[in-house]
Image: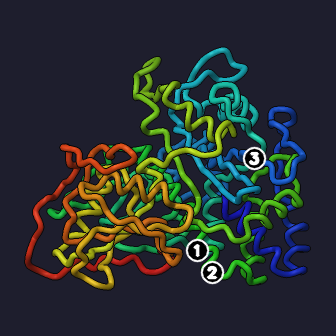
Amino acid sequence: MLTLNVLLVVAALGTAWALDYAYQSFGTLPRVELGAVLTPVDDTPGEAINVLMVGYDSSEGLDPDDPVNTGRNPASQLADVIMILRIDPSTTQAALVSIPRDLWVPIAGEGYSAKINTSYAVGGPPALIATIESYLGIPINSFVAVDFAGFQRIVGAIGGVEIYFPETARDTRSGLVPSGPGCTLLQADQALAYARSRYYQEQTASGGWRTDPYADFSRVRRQQDFIRQALSRAIDRGIRNPATLNALIGSVEDAVLLDEQITTRDILEIANRFRTFSPDALATYTMQDLVVGETIAGQAALRLREADAQPLLDLFRGVQPGLDPTPASVRVRVLNGSGASSQATEVAADLRLTGFTVTGTDNARGLGLARTTVRHAPGQRASAELLARHLVVEPLIEEDPTLLRAPVELVTGDDYAGLLAEPRPAGPASVGPTVATSTTTVVEEGPADTVTPPPGC
């Protein structure tokens, strides 16, 4: 969605021909009448807006033999993916939160409660928007939706999306064939299977399959990472080239549904402000720690812990300028700086157990580093400090404007001693007693690990 509504139009600013083409093409996109259900945006230049992004569960337009059609009702139409993108043009910052589709909420205008994706089935976009605004208190200023076939056309237009798989993975229900380990270029059908995967499995060393115990929440993280990778892929494929732009815009002409109030000029003005936006700067949030699983009316559902959720909701309400990072929002790359065998791989596994998002591992340029170091891109100091507070030893923290593959890098040194399950308090370091590590023995023999995602992955 970000690719379509920001980067595609950013590319249109590159040439007069492309700009004219964008005006014509975006003017023909399908629209949905939402009327007063949307919260109007102030006329103040640079005003932040919230865009409700929905991937809806419809197989219309797919090949009848597509795995998506297996065991499903072709007429069903549920909100399979619900995200809110907050764009602040004045600061060129963007934040994305995923709303669990099993969140139990009062359905606006219906007089009963159900899972939030039910609102889309009973009343379409207006009911979903009204439900979010009334229950979560988040104003929705604009709306965009895409179905399965549209998603596939978008992925096809950018030549597929590269995804890094730590282990060989599959989902027999969504149709994801065994992929990885390492970077795998997913084409349209497999990209959809990956994005929809709820029964994700990784292959174990013995050849068996281990099912991801976090189901929908892991799926949310994969979807958020997919957005980043799709953005990067669009840039790498030369989105400013008119021929590439032609194919990309042509692919979305009947694949994306927009609200009737947003204009091509609105999109172009936002895109102009975000023309240097980096995919790694997208802040992402989940509600995993803000909900509790319950059986409600005979259904497995999620109940919001309303008091705990207020800081996150306030961020998207515009009540506060920012939010402290969580482990899930920190994307970190691990480098083996000590030379200990397989250390980066083991540390990456421990970081994932602690909740961090690991983008890859590698050896540092120089081995034998004495002190563990956390490097961060500009503007990522808070994320680096959170990671540092999860380390048993107090590391050096350095800003590095050359970081490309992840906004934060952890370079292990000879002093590396593991991770803390809970972070130290902010301020002077104090080592806690609980270490969240899956492997604590350092193997002294054998080569250091060299798992390196290629550029663009």
User: From what the image shows, is residue 265 above or below residue 262?
Assistant: below
Q: Is residue 411 above or below residue 258?
A: below
Q: State the residue position of label 2.
A: 237
| Disc 2 to disc 1: CB gap under 8 Å | yes
For label 3, count other residues whose C-alpha is less than 10 Å away and answer few (under 14), some (14-19) or many (20+).
Answer: many
Image coordinates for residue 164, horizontal then vertical, percent: 41, 69
Q: Nearer the viewer, mark 3 or mark 2?
A: 3
Q: Indicate the quadrant containing the N terminus: top left, top right, bottom left or bottom right.
A: bottom right
Alpha carbon of mark 3 to alpha carbon of mark 1: how far? 25 Å
Q: Given the image, on which type of amino acid does mark 2 rest?
A: Arg
> Would residue 142 be visible to someone looking at this image?
yes
User: What's the amino acid at mark 1?
Assistant: Arg
Q: CA distance from mark 2 to mark 1?
A: 6 Å
Q: Would you identify the image quadrant in which residue 398 lies?
A: bottom left
Mark 3 vs 1, N-terminal side: 3
Front residue of 172/233: it is 233
Decide: few, some or many residues near mark 1? Use Cα within 10 Å; few <14, some 14-19, many ≥20: many
